[in-house]
Image (tube, rainbow, N blue to C red):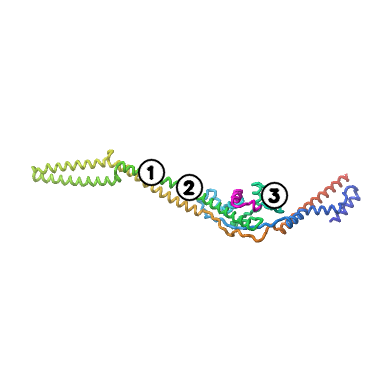
Amino acid sequence: MQRTMTERDGQLARLFPGITARPPSPWRGRLLVLLAFLPTLLAILYFSALAEDRYVSEARFLIRSGAKSPNDLGGLGAIMQMAGLSRPHDDAYAVRDFLTSREALEQLRARLDLRRIYDYAGKDLLLRYPSPVFPATAEGFYRYFQHRLSVVVNVDSGLVTLKVDAPHPAEAAELARALLDLGEGLVNRLNERMRADTIRVAALEVKRAEESRIAAEVALTAFRNRELMLDPVKTSAMVLQVIGRLAAAEAETNAQIAALRASAATSPQISTLEARRAAIRTEIDRERARVGPESEGLADKIEAYERLILEQDFATRLLAQAMTALETARLSAQRQEMFLERVVDPGLPDEAIEPRRVMMVFTVFGFNVLGAALVWLLGTGLHEHAAATRLRARLR
């Protein structure tokens, strides 16, 4: 191809002198090749002489939670669940987002001396901290730590893979364990918040029912203290029994009086029996007055007492229902609780697996070849376009 282009340029030079450029020098071609593959040379230099070993500690865990029924979800959530549009591992994504957040990094700072782990004197400027890329600021360290931490959620199984690297194996394992503890702490806080939100309304109903029950008991006690009787209904029954016995005694006395008048009309016992009958009648009237509609009668007291008893029974049933609802809410909160189940605990790495030097060099080389090919094609197209433009201008 190079020979064909040379012959074509020679023919153009013979036909139209001055159109074609001077033939390139061999040193220019070598320089272009060197510049084209400079990224590969720099990658070989970095990964062979400057890149330092990094130890990676890996842990895997699952976020398990109770099955949520459509009633436990909101309207949109229930519709999405029934339509199969909701994600089954939202809790795992929440834990992943927390572990990669600034809040988790601040909590990790409180547990471990991260500066001691990553701030060291080394020749690898890309790994050490601080560096020209990552300044010694909170935001700079956050961006730097994102390159040291990897949290990936498997969309099929929900398994979360956590990887963290450090210059030393013990520190990498310590970081992984601390991050797992932070994840468990988040799950526990979410459980507490969910439990509190679920039980709060039911607990308020129980408190309100208890207050109603206490108010009913206080009102009933005040009535008994005011009226000096425990149960007006029972008192009324006793009064009716007394009236019944008095009526029987009156009837017996009337019979005795009638018998004496028939046998001995002038008997002195008649006046005595009549006096006894009058006394019985007076007692009957007095007892009947006790259950009459007057302000001091038992009828009004029975009405007020029965109303208080109904209020007490209603408050008791309301309290029982509220207690049942509270227990149901507690069971529902327990079914919805999340658990961080450790599948693979962080181990102590005995070999540095980062950086993958050979793979990274070949990756850079592959991209380098593609980039050089694109540049060569672009340069060839521009050269041919310029030659064609000069030829058209010469023909004119």
Give residue 131's mark: 3
Q: Note whether 291 is above or below 175 in the view shown.
A: above
What element does badge 1 sit on?
A: helix
- Asked whether the residues under the numbered discs 3 and 1 touch, taking CB atoms below 8 Å apart as contact, a structural biologist would say no
Q: Position of residue 185 (x, y in %)?
A: 55, 52
What range is drawn magenta here? 101-118
Dot 3 or dot 2: first in sequence order is 3
* Residue farthest toward the bottom in the current orientation of the protein: 350
Quadrant of the image occupied by residue 264: top left
Q: Which residue is mark 1?
A: 215
Give residue 200's mark: 2
* Residue farthest toward the top in the current orientation of the protein: 295
Residue 382 in sight here: yes
Q: Position of residue 188 (x, y in %)?
A: 53, 52
What element does badge 2 sit on?
A: helix
Dot 3 or dot 1: first in sequence order is 3
Q: Residue at x 44, y 46 (%)?
A: 205
Give residue 1's mark: none
User: In the rendered view of the protein, which quadrant contains the N terminus?
Assistant: bottom right
Determine whether, in the image, residue 40 is placed left or right of residue 299. right
Magenta stretch encompasses residue 106 = yes
Q: Main secondary structure of the magenta part?
A: helix
Magenta stretch encompasses residue 155 = no
Q: Note whether 155 is above or below 237 in the view shown.
A: below
Q: Position of residue 221 (x, y in %)?
A: 34, 44
Q: Amino acid at mark 3?
A: Ser
Marks 2 and 1 sit apart, C-alpha to C-alpha, by: 23 Å
